[in-house]
Amino acid sequence: MTEGNGHGLTLAEKILARSAGLDHVVPGQIIEGDVDLAMMHEQGAQTVAPFAQMGATKVWDPDRVVIAIDHWVPASTEGAAVLHRILRKFAAEKGLPHFYDVGQHGICHQILAENGWVVPGDLAVGTDSHTNMLGAMGAVAAGIGPTEMAAVLALGKIWLKVPPTIEVRVRGRLGPGVTAKDLVLRILGEVKTTGATYKSVEYTGATIASLSMPERFTICNMTTEMGAKCGMVAPDQKTYDYLEKIAKHPMHPLQADRDARYERAIEVDVDGMPPMVACPYSPDNVRPLPEVAREHVRIDQAFLGSCTNARIEDIREGAALMKGEKVHAGVRFIVSPASTEIYKQCLEEGLIELFTDAGAVFTNSSCSACFGGNMGILAPDETCASSSNRNFPGRMGAKEAKIYLMSPAAVVATAIRGEITDPREMQ
């Protein structure tokens, strides 16, 4: 693929053209796309009133709608309980069978990923900004608002402006103790939180091809923090193997044209790259982790969870470091798996026992401490090491609290030492 004066289409343009039944689209063009998958979580409760107000009586295709309870599980406030009740009633009345309620729950994006709800070539939308994560399937996956979702539920269609595309070409080999989370933090440090506003970010190159599907989920997830409409990895054999037994509907895989026109191309070489950390108060305030570690930043809480990094691979990675160790005195360590299925895997593999014996709290699956509305809320002036995706003021509780974003391995190393630590020192 080349940057410049091509006349071909990027991956996002190819998919949006397919969804609109068009041969060609250009950035800035408004299309009416057929939606392949619509997802809602608790915020989706806000779609119910506008759905009725617009005169809709039935959902366009109940088999293409997924609802997942994930932010407050089980309901921790009366307000959350009301949201859950609204969604349960709506699903029952409209005959929506794919409802992941308490007991079968998980973070909505992980539910979509591990159950094959999004496949290559899809146009998928969800009432959460991190719906971008599903772009790792080679799909356009984007967050939308509740009123937009009401129209999608009624019509199965959405108006979208075709975004320009930034190509991020990655080369080199990630070294020991350096992960996909470090890679996306490095990219964020360059692109910044507004550098891809309403753009598509397409990750390419040999390094991206070498990443596992969970690793691709991580980098596409945090494309949201760049302001992007979608983040994408073109489908390949790893994608097809991942989906082979779980895909819920037929794939229509697409690739960018060789002469696709990109707005910008960014080259990233990861050879020799150290672990990275996003310092307060922005995901793009990125520095090499060893440099921050030399400042002996002490923490009050560590969090291994979120839709970014709470898959079984992340928890195993952390467990390998935690084995035979203890959580540092004065540190609260919260581990929250991304889905009930992952929780069960942790149970079967003895990982829950390992973490709890070390002094961590292993919770049920939920968004947990990530969004500052449920478990693990921070007090003013507290500091947290987190594997999540955002560290803006107030993200995990008090606006004065400090959040450092890092890989699961770095979170665990930091929980053990009680201060920000390069995980390579313990591997």
Image (spheres, helix red, strand yellow):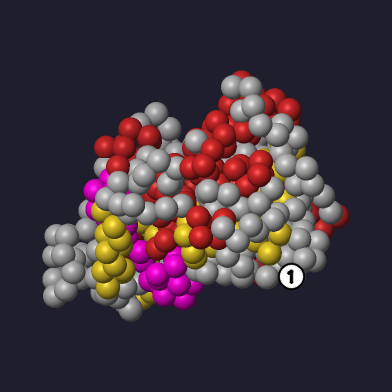
Can you see residue 343? no
Q: Position of residue 75 (x, y in %)?
A: 79, 48
Q: Which residue is mark 1?
A: 399
Instruction: Indicate the secondary structure of the residue bearing disc 1.
Output: loop
Q: Residue at x 66, y 44 (%)?
A: 417
Image height of 89 relative to 291, above or below: above
Q: Nearer the viewer, residue 252 or 227?
A: 227
Quick one: quadrant of the N terminus?
Answer: bottom left
Disc count in the image?
Answer: 1
In the rendered image, which quarter is residue 354 located in? top right
In the rendered image, which quarter is residue 103 located in? top right
In the rendered image, which quarter is residue 160 located in? bottom left
Q: Position of residue 340 (x, y in %)?
A: 63, 34
Q: Nearer the viewer, residue 14 or 422?
A: 422
Image height of 326 relative to 398, above or below: above
Q: Residue furthest right?
A: 78
Residue 208 is one of the magenta-drawn residues: yes
| Residue type indicated by callout 1 | Lys
Q: Nearer the viewer, residue 185 or 415?
A: 415
Horizontal side of residue 300 vs 404, given as left or right: right
Q: Which residues are magenta?
A: 188-209
Residue 177 is one of the magenta-drawn residues: no
Q: Residue at x 55, y 31 (%)?
A: 320
